[in-house]
Image (tube, grey):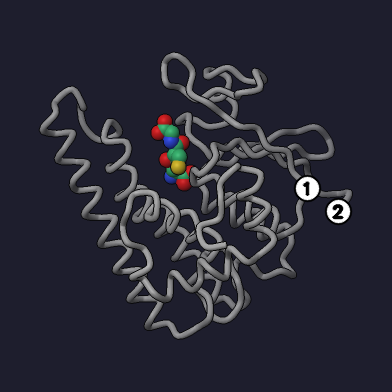
Amino acid sequence: MSSLPDLTLYYFPGACSQAVRTTLHELSLPFKSVVVRFDANRELEAADGSLSAKEYRDQIHHSSYVPGFVITFPDGRKESITEAPAILSYLASLVPEKNLAGKTELEKAKVLSWIIWFAGTAHGSAFTPYWSPKRFVDVSDQKLKEGVEKGGRRNIEAAYENLEKRLQKSGGEWFVGDELTLADIYSYIIYRWGVKENFGMEKYKKYTEIVRKLEARESVKKTLEEEGIPAHFQ
Ligand SMILES: N[C@@H](CCC(=O)N[C@@H](CS)C(=O)NCC(=O)O)C(=O)O
């Protein structure tokens, strides 16, 4: 453990950065976390005053989003990584014996496929237009704004249906086979967003079963406690 780099997560409670926190706990990796908040210009800055919005954008996240993730190596060199699937894959590689990225080459591809799909399709093409239409259109045009939000909501529903169908077909106990992977961990926050936005999540039976199992894990319990979010089922 002593040769491991220092890890710092920049997060917002209940955001996609939550998947990084749970992965860190699942791997028992020590880390520091810094909560971010919006400044007067709606740009993210460190809430503890350690980074202004400009510093956060310049040093941590080029687009001023979470998760921000910084690795400080024993020689003092710092690197930052962005995009949740990349951060999760990096973390899994620090503790390869836990196989969170999958065991076989085929499993690894399947885990990667799910986490890219969560980030790009379920989040980026569905929740992001629904919540942040300004990333797509000029929101001073009410019609355009509403059109994007509506498309986002439709894509969210389609994503959950797609996910449940694929889970039903796959037959394993978790997203990929019978062991917990990054795919399950990432799926948790995507489910909670559906709960928050009233998508009637319990109709997605297998997904719900997996989320119940996730909430029974110490890693998820710890994450929810640290982010001040109550469990959904327990
Ligand atoms: N593709 C990015 C998406 C990051 C993202 O959209 N994060 C949201 C929180 S879930 C965010 O930072 N929102 C702040 C904003 O839109 O200003 C990733 O996976 O890291």
Which of the two discs, 2 and 1, labels the residue nearer the N terminus?
2
Q: Is residue 137 above or below residue 232?
A: above
Q: Is mark 1 on a helix, strand or loop?
A: loop
Q: Position of residue 221 (x, y in %)?
A: 65, 56
What's the residue type where badge 2 is placed?
A: Met
Q: Quadrant of the C terminus?
A: bottom right
Q: In this view, does 144 lie to the left or right of 231?
A: left
Q: Mark 2 points at which residue?
A: 1
Callout 1 amino acid: Pro
| CB contact under 8 Å: marks 2 and 1 | yes
Q: Residues within 10 Å of mark 1 (few under 14, many from 20)?
A: few
**Residue found 18% across the figure and 46% down from its top:** 150
Residue position marked by numbered label 1 in the rendering = 30
Alpha-carbon distance for marks 2 and 1?
Answer: 9 Å
Local secondary structure at mark 2: loop
Q: In this view, does 209 lie to the left or right of 49?
A: left
Badge nearest the viewer, 2 or 1:
1
Instruction: Answer few, some or many: residues within 10 Å of disc 2's Cα (few below 14, many 20 plus, some between 14 and 19).
Output: few
